[in-house]
Amino acid sequence: MRNDPEVQQAVDQYQMGMPRLPTAGRSGEMLGRGTGSSIEFQEYREYLPGDDLRHVDWAAYARSDSLMVRLYREEISPRTEIILDASVSMTTQQGKKSRLAMQLTSLFSQLSGKLGGQPQIHFLNSSHPPLKLGLEALDRLPEIPFDGQQSLAELLNENAFSLKPQSVRIVVSDFLFPLDPDQLLKRLSVQASSLWLIQILSDWEANPETMGGRRLIDVETSQHADMLLTGQAIKKYRQRLHRLQEGLQQASRRTHASFVTVIADQGLERVCRNELSAVEILRPV
């Protein structure tokens, strides 16, 4: 996937949509959501024993007789963690979903590498513990099976993999599994510098059509059910999908994350140019 022509074209055209400091500091070029020692003032709070006296606002003390400390946005190194859902449900639509997922994983890894970072990929398939891959493993991605049986939510609840503090976390998944949006986002956003959720759906998953009688097979469990895909059945499905997406969107707003849905059938170039650029996950160079 490193040398995929579509990925390389995107690597040349885009950069990660990270907030930047006016001038680069010693610790890195990106800003976190925490507080630290960068040059951008964030807010005040009351002085506590052990605080750095250099951050005390003595002018405010002279005015109010209260010791106040200036807090600053934290500078972080460009650490990127990509959580790739490699469950069986990502293989539907003739592999278009898994292909786009791997392309996005390669793209974000290479963009992070251009910033001097060491991206880490959490490849959530059937391997236990989940695979941890770096830039050197990008060419191996197409060889690793998407055969996971557990959902992202289940793996997080089991603490199957650990997340590094102050990292840019990018989750690539279809999110078509039982989940509590608030609980999921709470787990994913802990100590994250930024959190981006990219939902990949096939065109049929996003916009199903009536098809009469069909046998529906769960690709993860092989269980099946015979049913009529009538207009009413499609309506109920769309309502459930809308509730899922709205729940993820609301939870994302509460945790200062970004959530976007992309359609695998549209291809990498269109997804980067439209959806990912619209929410500023990517920015043109």
Image: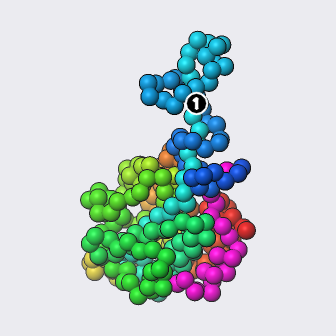
Residue 112 placement (x, y as % from top left) = 57, 67
Q: Is residue 207 visible?
A: no
As rendered, which of 205 and 283 lies closer to the eye? 283
Residue 247 placement (x, y as % from top left) = 47, 52
Residue 58 sits above or below residue 126 on the image: above
Residue 198 placement (x, y as % from top left) = 52, 65
Q: Which residues are magenta?
A: 1-21
As rendered, which of 145 and 176 lies closer to the eye? 145
Residue 77 falls inside the magenta stretch: no
As rendered, which of 267 and 4 lies closer to the eye? 4
Query: Residue at (73%, 68%) from the top-left corner?
Result: 285
Residue 3 placement (x, y as % from top left) = 58, 86
Q: Total label count?
A: 1
Q: How is the image coloured?
A: rainbow
Query: Residue at (64%, 13%) from the top-left corner?
Result: 62
Residue 105 sits above or below residue 167 on the image: below
Secondary structure at numbered mark 1: helix
Residue 155 sits above or below residue 62 on the image: below
Apparent side of residue 222 relative to residue 167 in the rendered image (left or right): left
Residue occupied by mark 1: 55
Residue 69 sits above or below residue 169 on the image: above
Crowding near pointer 1: few (<14 within 10 Å), some, many (20+)? some
Q: Is residue 205 visible?
A: yes
Residue type pointed to by label 1: His
To which quarter of the image does residue 176 belong? bottom left
Query: Residue at (61%, 36%) from the top-left corner?
Result: 42
Query: Residue at (52%, 23%) from the top-left corner?
Result: 46
As rendered, which of 109 and 237 lies closer to the eye? 109
